[in-house]
Amino acid sequence: MQRGEVQIWYTLLPDLHPHLASLSECLSPSERLRAARFSQEKDRLDFILSHGFLRTILGGQLGAPGSAVSWSVGPFGKPHLAEAGHAGAELAFSLSRTSGAAVCAMGRSIPVGIDVERIGPLPDFQELAASVLTPRERGALASLPVSQRERAFQRSWVCKEAILKLEGVGLGVHPGALDAGPGCWVAEPFSLLWEGQRLFLRTFEFAEQYVAALATRSEPSAVQFLRFEGP
């Protein structure tokens, strides 16, 4: 991966179950402790598989075993590689997981943020839209045919989350304060201004049931979409 390029890796977590042992070996002691705290077995397995997936991908870029990769996190959870040296200093990454899937974005000399959600009916769709969309977004959503509104809302949601992850502010900024506009409803890349800075976004779907969004602070020179099926 060259400077200015981005790779988006995606995986379906049930497909990684045969690799559970090897992916578990990648985890740090603190990750093992976190995994042990999950009360639900599915949540514990999803955490192990997604973090093993992340470590394997990062290790491949750094030329190191996944278990040797280390990072620190900011006050709202944004990770930064702790590796010394040119490769580690240039590599930015972002991880997101949802029920059954995980995605990892990596950028060489380009900060990234990514989010993924499972596509499906939202019982509290109207309440969510009223809470996290701006008035302009709600008006644009209302102009769509009813059958398209939930899908469009989910694309808006992943774009907002990807931006907040890119900026490292997490829940420090309410999603309703961020206007992603209708550009996120299509698969084409688009840009927007937020707090005086132009951000670049693109959305994509995979496996017919997941939607994800990538956010960057500059336009990538190239974006690769890659599927991870195991170490």
Image (tube, grey):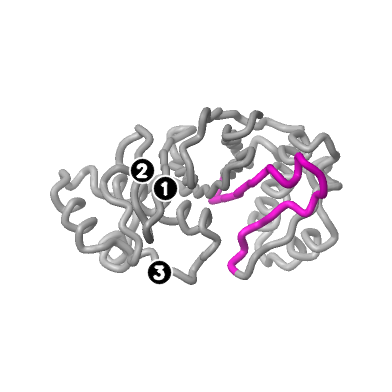
Q: Name the residue under label 3.
A: 174
**Boundaries of the magenta span:** 76-100
- Local secondary structure at mark 2: strand
Instruction: Residue under label 2, please give it.
Output: 191
User: CA separation, marks 1 and 3?
Assistant: 18 Å
Residue 138 occupies quadrant: bottom left
| Lower position in the chain sequence, tag 2 or tag 1 | 2
Q: What element carries label 3?
A: loop
Q: Mark 1 points at which residue?
A: 199
Q: Front-most of 187 and 21?
A: 187
Height in image: 4 above or below 149?
above
Q: On the rendered structure, is 220 left or right of 15?
A: left
Image point 16% across, 56% down: which residue?
139
Q: Do the residues labelled 2 and 1 touch (CB within 8 Å)?
A: yes
Residue at horizontal 18%, vertical 51%?
140
Question: Looking at numbered disc 3 in the image, what kind of residue is underneath it?
Answer: His
